[in-house]
Image (cartoon, rainbow, N blue to C red):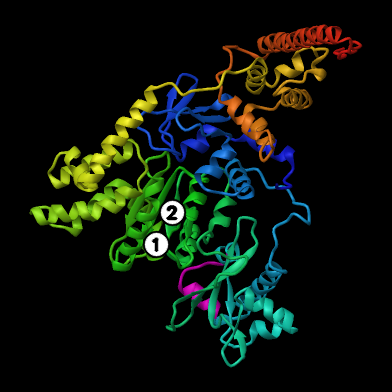
Amino acid sequence: MSRIPQAFIDELIARADIVEVVGSRVTLRKAGRDFKGLCPFHDEKTPSFHVVPSKGFFHCFGCGANGSALGFLMRYDNLPFREAVEALAEIVGLPMPALAADDAPPVADGLIPLLHEADQIYRRLLRESREAVDYLKRRGIDGPTAARFGLGYAPDAWDTLRSALGRDETRIARLIEAGLLIRNEQGRVYDRFRDRIMFPIRNVKGDVIGFGGRVLGSGEPKYLNSPESPVFHKGRELYGLYEARQRPGRPDEILVVEGYLDVASLAQFGVEPAVATLGTSTTADHLRRLTRLTDRIIFCFDGDRAGRAAAWRALETVLPFAGGTVEIKFLLLPDGEDPDSLVRARGADGFKAVLDGAAPLSTFMLEELAARVDLADVDGRSRLITFARPLLDRLPAGFYKELLIEELARLAKIEPARFVALLEGPKAAADRANRGAEGSARAAAPRPRGRSTPIGKTITLLLHHPAAAALAEPVQGLHAVDEPGAPLLRRLLELAREHPNLTLASLIERFRDDPDEKHIRRLAAESPPPIENDAAAAVVLADSLERIVRDYTEKVRRRETADALRRRRRGQPPDLGHDLS
């Protein structure tokens, strides 16, 4: 279990808006005081997934999934506990606490400090290189922008870092591991980056974890990136994300572009925030990071063949995120233009005017599919279905997918039901119909539940109204009750009295990885009695606790009476019984 302070987890859960967290991934609709939608954890057509903002709690009455905003991120984004905490902290703007030394994630034996040293060397060498400074001026990058993004220069030499930082074999090995040096097959060690403008890549804490190098001349490759390392993973990081997060407030939108210079140039003209992938296609991890920060993502790529291909790869990646509250758009720039050249030619207002023409994901997908086939003939419309099938498979079930199917069916000039049947094939369609009928029958039938005991009902009441514990008078004799669930009830009462501001969500998190977690989650899903406030709940709680003690006392009395009769018949001395005081 992580050693992240429990007080931090409590504050994180208290600050998190579970409707915002869940709603960025699931389409929710208001239902009285709560919200509901189609469950993302099982296939359903009738919404059984409920979000209760007043308690920071979600629950699906279909599959039983429930928990806090933190638990939702762990399950939906498939994140381990610590990463989910970091993700939620990023969403609510709460800085992560310092971890204990023995609990902090390993930093690969000091790679971060080495990368920092290299970064400082590159920055100094940029100031000393007239050629590199002139190159940046020709590209229109001014001094404040270069300073903000920490630009540097790797000279046209084989041993700049090797001489400055490789003082012994141990450091040389670490420099190689960090991707700063290379050892060839002959055993020679030399600098990876030479004669390049250096763009430091920073993680969300601002640590330099890698570099992107842009060649000054006409050499190849034009851009050279650090290799994967223990601290640098291209599929997770985004260039410019650290700088984007330094701006106050939640951005209305974030641009995703292809080049580091694009990010810097746009920022210089006030068109931000913008980020760039690190020589890779957009990944699901990239999308998860971006959707935590904004409600609109615009992919802005060059209009050439490579740009269109990159846009299509991005579309395939984002499809599982479609249909939620995050708006995803695509913009292909005029042929021959990139964000850097366009913003310099037209200025910030001109670029933003072009940006206003970005197409929604659905429009971009439909237009690109239509451009690949000839919809005027049967062969083309048949190929449309073939191309659409793998894309639709990636979309989450729900209204968005159904509306998109209707549009595709219109393009193919057939009925939507027929379109779906053709997508699935005869056997799959029949199986789907059977599953749908069985699912409807299961949904209509009440779910069997075990009979809840008085202790179980009291725990449910306490989970939904933890503040009632501090308001209710202590009940004598509860410590002696020896019934299933009684130890858990006593633990909850003690916890709720000690921390009266806990919510249902924070109580669930306090029992994460606890032997009683499964009981807490099951009872939290039970419907509490219809009580309006904590004061009223305290009255009911005190009455329930007294009844539990009274019933147990009576049960013990009857058992002792029966036992005394048996002993009398056998001629044995009487038992002294139990002290319930």
Look at 42% across and 60% down and name the residue there: 257
How many badges with numbers are in the image?
2
Question: Would you say 405 lies left or right of 58 here?
Answer: left
- Residue 526: percent from left, percent from top: 56, 22
Main SS type for the magenta part?
A: helix
Residue 111 image point, x, y percent: 68, 70
Q: Residue furthest left?
A: 377
Q: Quadrant of residue 166?
A: bottom right
Cα–Cα span, label 2 and label 1 = 10 Å
Secondary element under disc 2, as helix, strand or loop, is strand
* Residue annotated with mark 2: 255
Label drawn at residue 339: 1
Side of 182 where 172 appears, left or right? right
Highlighted range, magenta: 132-144
Whether pointer 2 and pointer 1 mark residues with C-beta atoms closer than 8 Å, the reply is: yes
Label 1 CA crowd tier, 10 Å (few <14, some 14–19, many 20+): many
Tell me what residue is drawn at x 56 percent, y 67 percent: 146
Q: Nearer the viewer, residue 198 or 522?
A: 522
Give x and y (percent) for residue 69: 57, 37
Measured along the vertical axis of the image, is residue 38 above or below residue 384?
above
Element carrying mark 1: helix
**Residue 141 covered by magenta stretch:** yes
Describe residue 411's horizontal placement relative to residue 254 as left or right: left
179 w.r.t. 301: above or below: below
Identify the residue shown where x is 58% and y is 13%: 529
Q: Is residue 42 above or below residue 335?
A: above
Q: Is residue 188 magenta?
A: no
- Could one spot residue 106 in this view of the protein? yes
Mark 2 or mark 1: which comes first in sequence? 2
Name the amino acid type tagged 1: Pro
